[in-house]
Amino acid sequence: MIPYGRQSIDDSDIDAVVRVLRSPMLTQGEAVPSFEKALAATVGAPHAVAVTNATSALHIACVALGLGPGDRLWTVPNTFVASANAGIYCGAAVDFVDIDPRSYNMDVDALEAKLAATPRDRLPKIVVPVHFAGQSCEMDRIAALAARYGFRVIEDASHAVGAEYEGEPVGNCRYADIAVFSFHPVKIVTTGEGGMCLTRDAGLADRLRRLRSHGITKDPALCDRPLDGDWDYRQIELGFNYRMTDIQAALGEAQVAKLSEFLARRRELAARYDTLLSNLPVVAPWQHPDTRSSWHLYVIQVPAGTRRQVFDRLRGGGIGVQVLYIPVHRQPYYERLGFRAGQFPVAEAYYARSFTLPMFPALTNSEQDQVVEVLAAALEGADAG
């Protein structure tokens, strides 16, 4: 089976992990700050805070921005459930904005219309645009709406390590308060499991660091009384145990060193797919001229009514395609909150026709040719009736 995604691990990654395993500190040592510094420098953000996974990064990003009961978070239905769940964790209400039919990202026209139609006391406190498949949302327009309507912005950039927007790296927070990356094994770089919050705001960064470690500080300026010694600390707010280990961080820093290599191969594969699929009855990914995708995913749409047949035939032919994502508002949990079919028709129509083809740096040209050959045969025999 050729998987839809897979990590790329070599001896440099293994050596980095072994060095930590042979060191005195497996956690809370020097590897996490070193990884944070490397990634922050790569994307041009002043502050980076590593955590256990992107879900915990989204969670503490919401907490750090003051999201709580009575507040609202808006995101898109075309995402993993974590983008919405982070708001629920904080006791906030969640709502969705439909996607653009070409980019599959948040439709900024729909966002603007929804904001204009919403009473001021029901406007979102946080909006979470999701850079789906590695392509940035139209962040300049979203930032302009944030300034007009007073909401904060968290970029869910889980797919977009190494992507660019308006010629600058995604994650530099030019248009957002906080950006979040994921380091799951199928993502651009991996730490096994892991996530990162990035921000330009030093105060937010300090709070994110406290929140990942139980809300604890040793900063005398934040303590209610003098510390009794080097062992002493103060829990000044309710935080969480979201610390990344040095083992994970060592792997992450070794991966970041190869980011440009990973991106070059992903972009080469995407260009080959564009050519190989040009004569097939599929909708290939569209790219906004202001973006340069990291190509975490290469998603296609097949003729209406054929997705299940084509998907099953690809899986039967050894091609590990995957559907990303089931619209969040159609999940049973969210339907119990009152969401229903038909509310976000573009996301639902996209879901009904789409799946992602294999995309990872170790995918060979011959394997990619095999993917397209099996896809062509599956499409030829598919019946939309």
Image (cartoon, rainbow, N blue to C red):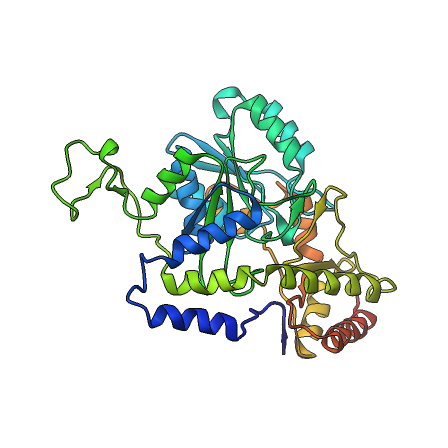
Position of residue 250 measured from the top left corner of the image (x, y, whole percent): 43, 63
- Asked if residue 233 lies left or right of residue 377, the reply is left
Q: Where on the picture, by quarter, is residue 75?
A: top right
- Asked if residue 263 lies left or right of residue 84, the reply is right
**Residue under the image location 74 percent in, 63 percent down:** 268
Judged from this view, the residue extending furthest toward the right is 279
- Asked if residue 356 lies left or right of residue 74, the reply is right
**In this rendering, is residue 43 above or below 306?**
above
**In this rendering, is residue 127 above or below 270?**
above
Position of residue 162 measured from the top left corner of the image (x, y, whole percent): 61, 53
Evaluate whether residue 278 shows in this view. yes
Q: Where on the picture, by quarter, is residue 66?
A: top left
**In this rendering, is residue 137 above or below 19?**
above
**Residue under the image location 70 percent in, 58 percent down:** 299
Pick the front one: 167 or 34: 34
Evaluate whether residue 90 shows in this view. no
Position of residue 38 measured from the top left corner of the image (x, y, whole percent): 50, 53
- Quarter of the image where the N terminus is located: bottom right
Pick the front one: 67 or 261: 261
**Residue under the image location 16 percent in, 45 percent down:** 232
Pick the front one: 232 or 319: 232
- Quarter of the image where the C terminus is located: bottom right
Position of residue 25 measured from the top left corner of the image (x, y, whole percent): 30, 63
